[in-house]
Image (cartoon, rainbow, N blue to C red):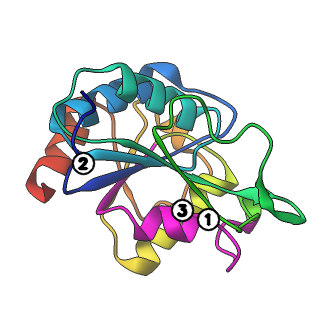
Amino acid sequence: MSPRLAAKTVGVIGSGTDEHAELAEAVGTLLARLGVNLLTGAGGGVMRSVSRAYSRSPRDAGICIGIVPCAPGDPARPRHGYPNPFVELPIYTHLPESGAEGTADLSRNHVNVLSSFALVALPGGAGTASEIELAARYGKPIIVYAPDERLARGLPTGARRVSTIREVEDFLRPLL
């Protein structure tokens, strides 16, 4: 039987190329245990790693959601490599922008942030930085999970950084 839909959705953002597997797997497992939905940008890297851990974890509630960008110049086709195979509910968009263009009107990052009641940022680049900026703009609770402060370099400093999965859980629990 499929897990039932949870009432709350947590967005996880981070690198589209580097999986940061140890961090992402801990977050995916935690979110499954908490019984929330997981929302990512549906791609590789952190998005794939957290989705894999979440979808393979035992859970009574929740679903793995991926917001899928379109191929540049072709809004009827998903971007190559999207969604990753662990996304259980892909939401296809006509939005091609990401990375350095992550705050642009045609970026799915707005959907990622606005659809989440809270966000967990893992190490990443320009796209992750843009989602942190959007979280601040839209007043969404966000935390950066980076045990080594070097992993948070280049990310906006407005979001609190934590170094343990317990601190991530302590951030999320009062919001549930």
SS of the residue at dot 1?
loop
Residue for badge 3:
131
Amino acid type indicated by mark 1: Arg
Q: Position of residue 88 (x, y in %)?
A: 45, 38
Inspect the magenta stretch and tell me whether residue 14 lies in it: no
Inspect the magenta stretch and tell me whether residue 105 lies in it: yes
Report how far apart the C-alphas of labels 3 and 2 lie in the structure: 24 Å
Left or right of residue 5, residue 82 in this image: right
Mark 1 and mark 2 lie on one chain; the one further toward the N terminus is 2
Report how far apart the C-alphas of labels 1 and 3 lie in the structure: 10 Å
Residue for badge 1:
108
In contact (CB < 8 Å): disc 1 and disc 2: no
* 10 Å crowding of disc 1: few (<14), some (14-19), many (20+): many
Between circles 3 and 2, the one closer to the viewer is: 2
Relative to residue 141, is residue 5 depicted above or below? above
Amino acid type indicated by mark 3: Glu
Residue stretch in magenta: 101-121
Picture quadrant of residue 123 = top right
Mark number displayed over residue 5: 2
**Who's the residue at 17% across and 37% down the image?**
34
